Image (spheres, rainbow, N blue to C red):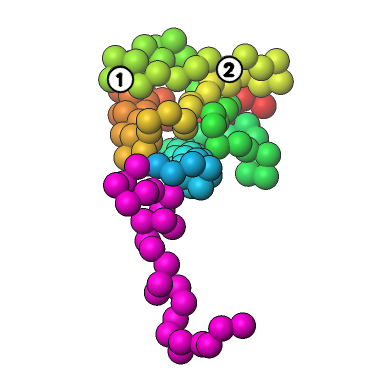
Amino acid sequence: MGKKSGKNELAKVDPVYVLGLDANGKPRGARFSELKDNIASAAMDMNCRVLIEGMRALGFEPLLSHNLQAPIIVTFRMPADPKFQFQEFYDRLKDRGYVIYPGKLTVADSFRIGCIGRLYPDHMRGALGAIRDILGDMGVTSLKAAA
């Protein structure tokens, strides 16, 4: 064993190496790939959390419980309010630049919203604002799902 310097050994670690970049700021191998994957995963988790919390605040019910939900795409139960017409909802969101997906499930009427891609929490918040406004314009007063 070598002689202890008495200084914090972490202070000697090159921060560029820790980030997975070489001295010129370029990615360096597997270390960078792992970091990049972890960052992408954390971003999806954050987007998913913002989306679910926001949709719940509006009154929507996610189809899956938290312990089963993956952070890629979230399925929400279709509201029972007769003023909620999915095609109109879909078209109005699309007109504002947000594309959602109709549900393809037999267990419940639903629609899906993606959390992946080059998206950030502010994009999720923008979608939530558009959803809130559109529901108001449609006159939807209850987002309780059909039994």
The majority secondary structure of the magenta stretch comes to loop
Q: Position of residue 106 (x, y in %)?
A: 70, 15
Q: Position of residue 33 (x, y in %)?
A: 50, 40
Taking the spot 33% from the left edge, 34% from the top edge, the residue there is: 123
Instruction: Read off the magenta span.
Output: 1-26
Label 2 is placed on what type of residue?
Answer: Gly
Judge left or right: residue 44 versus residue 124.
Answer: right
Label at residue 44:
none
Which element carries disc 2, helix, strand or loop? loop
Query: Picture coordinates of residue 112 (x, y %)?
Result: 53, 23
Above or below residue 32? Residue 106 is: above
- Magenta stretch encompasses residue 88: no
Closer to the observer: label 1 or label 2? 1
Asked where in the image residue 100 lies, by quadrant, the reply is top left
Residue designated by label 1: 97
Q: Is any atom of residue 45 visible in this view? A: no
Nearer to the camera, 141 or 72: 72
What's the residue at 63%, 44% (across, down)? Answer: 66
Residue 86 visible in the shown view: yes
In primary-sequence order, the first of circles 1 and 2 is: 1
The residue at which mark 2 appears reads as: 103
Which residue in the rendered view is the most extreme toward the right? 107
Judge whether 141 appears above or below 101 on screen: below
